[in-house]
Image (spheres, grey):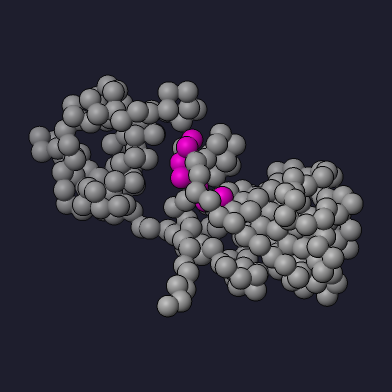
C-alpha cells in the first residue's frame, strides 16, 4: 500500500490512521491478532521500526496491545463519531447549528467578490468573506468559507463574527431567503483542510456548497464547507 511520501504527516502516523480505519470498519475485529510486523512492513514498504511506532501510537488509545511473544491484538474499538447530520432543509440546518453551538475560530476576514456560478443567481454589490473553523468538544469538524452580502453583514457585524451565520439569516425578516440550494460531494482533504481539521492529507472529506438567494435572485450567502468524513452522516427519506 502506497503512502504519501511528500506529506507533512509522518509515515507512522499515516499507517496508524489506516489501522484505525481497519479497526473501526471491523476488518480487524476486537480480539483478533494483527499481522506480524514483518508482513505489515512489507505491505507498506517501511521498516519494522515504523510499524512499531504506529502500533505504539494506537496502544496509547487503548485499542491495541502488543504482547511479548504473542503478537499485537485488538483490545478495543474506536467509537464511530458520525454525530453531525447533514440536513436537507434550511429550517433543520438552522436548528442543527443552534443545537450543536459550535466553537468558532475565525481565520480570516476580507471584502471580495463571491465565486458564483451562472445558475446561482445575481451577485450582491460586495461580499464579506469569512474563513472559519467549527469545533465540537475542542475537536475541529469543518472548515468553512462564507461569502455574505456586505449589506447584511453591516446590520450586525459582531454577531456575524461570533455566531453561526445560517441561524442569524433565518432570523432576518428582510430579505427573506426564497431559494436555498445545497450540493454535497465526496473528496479528499488538501493540505489546508488537513491542517485545519487535524487529519492526514488526502483523508476522506464531505464538501458541501450552499447558496441562499432572495426574491430578486440576489445571492445573499454562499458557503463552501469541508467536513471531516468520519464526523458526517447523511440521512435521506427515500419515498416509495
Q: Residue visible at 46% across and 61% down? A: 233
Q: Position of residue 64 (x, y in %)?
A: 25, 45
Looking at the image, which is closer to me, 122 or 196? 122
| Image quadrant in which the N terminus is located | top left
* Of residues 76 and 217, the one drawn nearer to the viewer in this rendering: 217
Where 212 sits versus 107, above or below?
Answer: below
Displayed quadrant of residue 94: bottom right
**In this image, 203 relative to 164: left or right?**
left
The quadrant of the rendering that contains the C terminus is bottom left
Say above or below: 193 vs 119.
above
Side of 176 where 142 appears, left or right: left
Evaluate whether residue 181 shows in this view.
yes
Residue 235, placed above or below residue 239: above
Residue extending farthest to the left is 69
Measuring 56% from the left and 34% from the top, which residue is drawn there?
A: 191
Residue 201: image location, x then y, percent: 49, 35
Q: Residue at x 47, y 73 (%)?
A: 237
Residue sitting at x 83%, y 53%: 123
Image coords of residue 218 (percent x, y) = 82, 60
Residue 105 makes an appearance in the image: no
Relative to 236, residue 31 above or below: above
- The question of residue 206 being in magenta is answered with yes
Q: Is residue 200 on the magenta stretch?
A: no
- Identify the magenta region: 201-207
**Front-most of residues 104 and 62:** 104
Viewer-side residue, 221 vs 64 = 221
- Image position, residue 6 (x, y; %): 47, 23
Q: Residue 223 falls in which quadrant of the image?
A: bottom right
Amino acid at each position: 500500500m502506497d503512502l504519501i511520501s511528500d506529506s507533512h504527516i509522518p509515515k507512522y502516523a499515516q499507517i496508524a490512521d489506516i489501522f484505525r480505519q481497519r479497526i473501526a470498519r471491523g476488518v480487524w475485529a476486537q480480539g483478533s491478532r494483527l499481522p506480524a510486523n514483518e508482513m505489515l512492513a512489507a505491505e507498506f514498504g517501511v521498516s519494522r521500526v515504523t510499524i512499531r511506532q504506529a502500533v505504539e501510537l494506537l496502544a496509547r488509545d487503548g485499542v491495541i496491545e502488543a504482547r511479548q511473544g504473542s503478537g499485537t491484538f485488538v483490545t478495543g474499538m474506536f467509537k464511530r463519531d458520525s454525530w453531525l447530520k447533514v440536513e436537507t432543509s434550511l429550517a433543520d440546518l438552522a436548528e442543527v447549528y443552534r443545537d450543536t453551538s459550535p466553537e468558532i475560530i475565525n481565520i480570516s476576514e476580507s471584502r471580495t467578490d463571491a465565486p458564483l456560478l451562472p445558475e446561482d443567481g445575481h451577485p450582491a454589490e460586495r461580499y464579506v468573506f469569512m474563513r472559519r473553523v467549527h469545533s465540537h468538544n475542542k475537536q475541529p469538524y469543518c472548515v468553512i468559507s462564507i461569502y455574505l452580502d456586505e449589506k447584511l453583514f453591516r446590520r450586525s457585524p459582531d454577531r456575524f463574527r461570533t455566531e453561526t451565520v445560517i441561524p442569524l439569516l433565518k432570523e432576518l425578516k428582510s430579505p427573506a431567503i426564497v431559494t436555498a440550494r445545497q450540493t454535497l460531494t465526496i473528496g479528499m482533504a488538501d493540505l489546508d483542510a488537513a491542517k485545519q481539521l487535524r487529519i492526514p492529507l488526502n483523508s476522506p472529506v464531505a464538501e458541501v456548497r450552499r447558496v441562499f438567494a432572495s426574491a430578486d435572485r440576489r445571492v445573499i450567502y454562499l458557503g463552501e464547507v469541508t467536513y471531516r468524513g468520519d464526523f458526517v452522516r447523511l440521512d435521506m427519506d427515500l419515498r416509495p
